[in-house]
Image (cartoon, rainbow, N blue to C red):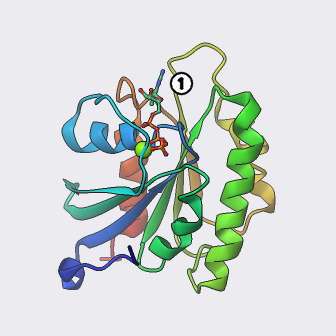
Amino acid sequence: MGCIQSSEKKNANHRSLLLLGIDGAGSTTVLYQLVQHERVETIPTLAFNRETLTFEGMEYEIWDIGGNDKVRPLWTKYAREAHAIIYVVDATDKNRLPMAAQELKLFIDDSENNHYPTSKNPLLIFANKQEMDGAKNVDEMREALGMDSLPFSNYKIVGCSAKTGDSLNEGLHWLTQQLKEPE
Ligand SMILES: Nc1nc2c(ncn2[C@@H]2O[C@H](COP(=O)(O)OP(=O)(O)OP(=O)(O)O)[C@@H](O)[C@H]2O)c(=O)[nH]1
Ligand SMILES: [Mg+2]
């Protein structure tokens, strides 16, 4: 296992995305909804899943890294060559929201040490499982994740449901706008 390597990197429309989130947040479900437009039965990701997706003219290589606490230390290793991060949070899991916030902060601190420019690159947060009762909305998530104290100047939180596919494309559309070369 190592950092992201790609022979396609020279393509001006190629971008690597890192899909992260603590275990059970739904990152693998997000991945396959984006790529296959269907909800797949998942098992916990022990290492990573890698898929490619063409979206609005961008050729994405998406790396979904497991969120189990044994795998989390690998997040920063994959971050070096990523152009953007998608962080998936289970908006219904109030007990584990502090952990999701803490892991995002740790990732950022660690990434800065690895020279990953988290303060410049865009961050998309999916507040997932919105179709369930009691899911926290975007404002509640911003507060729960302590976004005001994180060094991201360019982030967006999108409420979504990976189960139904709702609003995933809205999030990816925003990210694509951020990643396009200025004309
Ligand atoms: N209700 C609901 N369940 C979801 C949604 N997204 C994912 N799930 C469920 O949440 C569970 C975990 O989903 P995964 O996609 O495997 O989670 P993960 O973040 O990849 O977890 P790890 O691989 O362990 O890091 C599964 O039972 C999914 O079906 C959603 O939008 N709504
Ligand atoms: Mg997974």
Q: Residues within 10 Å of mark 1 (few under 14, many from 20)?
A: many
Residue 166 at x, y = what percent? 39, 28
User: Which quadrant holds residue 149?
Assistant: bottom right
Residue 180 at x, y = what percent? 34, 69
Seen from the viewer's position, the closer of residues 181 and 133 is: 133
Q: Which residue is the site of mark 1? A: 130
Q: Quadrant of the N terminus?
A: bottom left
Farthest residue in the top direction? Answer: 133
Seen from the viewer's position, the closer of residues 181 and 142 is: 142
Q: Quadrant of the C terminus?
A: bottom left
User: Which quadrant holds residue 70?
Assistant: bottom right
Position of 7 with respect to 128 (left or right) is left
Residue 24 at x, y = what percent? 53, 36
User: Which quadrant holds residue 165?
Assistant: top left
Seen from the viewer's position, the closer of residues 38 and 11 is: 38
Is residue 21 visible in the rendered structure shown here?
Answer: yes
Seen from the viewer's position, the closer of residues 44 and 118 is: 44
Up/down of 170 relative to 49, above or below: above
Is residue 152 visible in the rendered structure shown here?
Answer: no
SS under mark 1: loop
Q: How many marks?
A: 1
Up/down of 160 relative to 178, above or below: above
Residue 62 at x, y = what percent? 32, 59
Identify which residue is drawn at 77% across, 43% down: 98
Identify which residue is drawn at 50% across, 18% down: 131
Identify which residue is drawn at 58% across, 47% down: 22
Is ligand 1 within 8 Å of the beta carbon of the residue shown at mark 1? Answer: yes
Identify which residue is drawn at 26% across, 62% down: 60
Identify the amino acid type marked 1.
Gln
